[in-house]
Image (cartoon, rainbow, N blue to C red):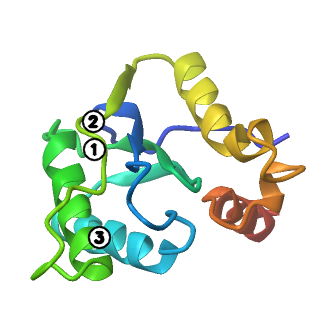
Amino acid sequence: MMQLTRPSPAGKTASLTFTLRGDAGFTLTDKYDALRAAIRFTGQKMPFYSDACVALPDQLLCVWTLPADDSNFAIRWQTIKNRFASAVLDIETETRNIWTPGANMQELTSIVDYADAVRRCWFAPVERDLAVTPEGWAYSSIHREDAEAQMAA
C-alpha cells in the first residue's frame, strides 16, 4: 500500500470540494483539459501543492497544501474559476456562474485527517460507480502518484 506523506516545508493543508451547477451545460470531465490548464496556470502564479485531486462530472475534490507563509485558498480558487470559465464559455454572451457559490473546505491538521482526505478524493469515483478502482478513473491525480511510486521503486 502506498504511504502518504505531506510535502515539506508545508503551510496549511485543506480538503476542498467545488461543485458545478447542474445547469452548466457540460461536465467537468467534458472540459477536463481546460480545468487542468486553469489549475496549472494558477499554481504557476500562486504556488500550491496539489496533494490529491479528482474531477468528477459535477465536482472537483482536492487536497491542497499552501506555502508556509500563505493561507489564501480562496484567491487560488477564484483564479481557477475565472480562468476555467474564460476557456469554456463565450464570456461576451454567457454571464451565468457555472459553479455553486462557495466551497466546502476542511483544514487538515493531522496525518490521519490528511490520509483520510486523500483517500476520499481518490475513491470518490468508485463510490459514485464511475470506476471499479481509483486507478480506473482517468481524471485523478492518483495516476501521478502511481508514476512517482514506480519511479522510486
Disc 1 marks which residue?
66
Look at the image and tell me whether residue 44 can be seen: no
Judged from the image, the secondary structure of the residue bearing numbered disc 1 is: loop
- State the residue in front, 88 or 147: 88
The image shows residue 5, relative to residue 76, as above or below, that is above
User: Which of the 4 image quarters holds residue 97?
Assistant: bottom left
Residue type of the residue flagged with mark 3: Phe
The residue at the far right in this view is: 132
Residue at the image position 31 percent from the left and 71 percent from the top: 38
Disc 3, SS: helix
> Which marked residue is nearer to the observer: mark 1 or mark 3?
3
Callout 2 amino acid: Gly
Disc 2 secondary structure class: loop
Identify the mark nearer the N-term, 3 or 2: 2
Q: Can residue 23 be seen here? A: yes
Q: Are marks 1 and 3 in contact (CB under 8 Å)?
A: no
Q: Which mark is residue 11?
A: 2
